[in-house]
Amino acid sequence: MLLNDTEYLPLSYLSQTAYCPRRVGLLLNERIWLESADTAKGRKEHESVHTQRIERRGSQVKLYEYSVYSDSLGVSGKCDLIEAQGDPSGCRIPAVDFPVTLYPVEYKHGKLREEQEYKIQLCAQAMCLEEMYHTHIPEGAVFYISSHRRQPVVLDEPLRQSVQETARQLRQIRDALTTPYAQYSAKCKRCSLLEYCMPSVKRSADSYCEQLAQEAKEAEAL
Ligand code: SF4
């Protein structure tokens, strides 16, 4: 995907798409947002890192709230933190006057857990940086704020393909300006849009319609 006049979509919505395509349709196309205790807590915890700044200690530099974009993925957004380490074989970035290797870190609220959508978001950030600065980033990390634990993530080829596939899906949802149907799953219980989305009701309505169609077919056959 290469952008010309097309809008960049929010990079963080890759994570939302991977979580649930309907959720991103509601957020992006229908502009629905419902605050929950979980989202409020997450926002509060994020406030400590969401201040754009640079911290230096010798050849180690920490860049907070760093803007990134990718024409090939069609997204733009911010990295919570990029750790830049001085390295003669590294790349050049505007904020630092020596070559560096880059290590993105995505902050998430709550305790350490395995979430594929967080890895997709982190890998997308790395792919943006690679495209911007012609470098390679083999690893990043997700930092869980409540437990103060860092989970390293290897940015391998399957994960990169998942990022590309998710970016295509996000673009399709945006271009079609539609909201995918609800698919009830365990994720719905943690979704802040549950009340609005009502996936169980939708599923019941679908089953009821299917049942009516089946009865009509059977009546025709008599
Ligand atoms: S309630 Fe379930 S189906 Fe609806 S948006 Fe949330 S995760 Fe998706």
Image (cartoon, rainbow, N blue to C red):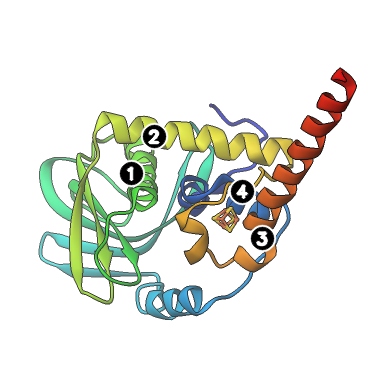
Q: Quadrant of ligand 1?
A: bottom right
Image coordinates for residue 92, horizontal then vertical, percent = 26, 44
Give the position of the C terminus as an image quadrant. Answer: top right
Give the mark toward the camera: 1 or 3.
Answer: 3
Up-down relation of residue 215 to residue 55 (above or below): above
Residue type highlighted by circle 4: Arg
Tag 1 near tag 2, CB within 8 Å: yes
Q: Is mark 4 within 8 Å of ligand 1?
A: yes
Residue at image x 36%, y 79%? 48
Q: Which mark is residue 123?
A: 1
Residue 188 in sight from this viewpoint: yes
Sequence order check, earlier mark of 1 and 2? 1
Image coordinates for residue 60, horizontal then vertical, percent = 14, 61
Left or right: residue 103 compared with residue 80: left
- Residue at mark 1 to residue at mark 3: CA–CA distance: 31 Å
Residue 73 in sight from this viewpoint: no
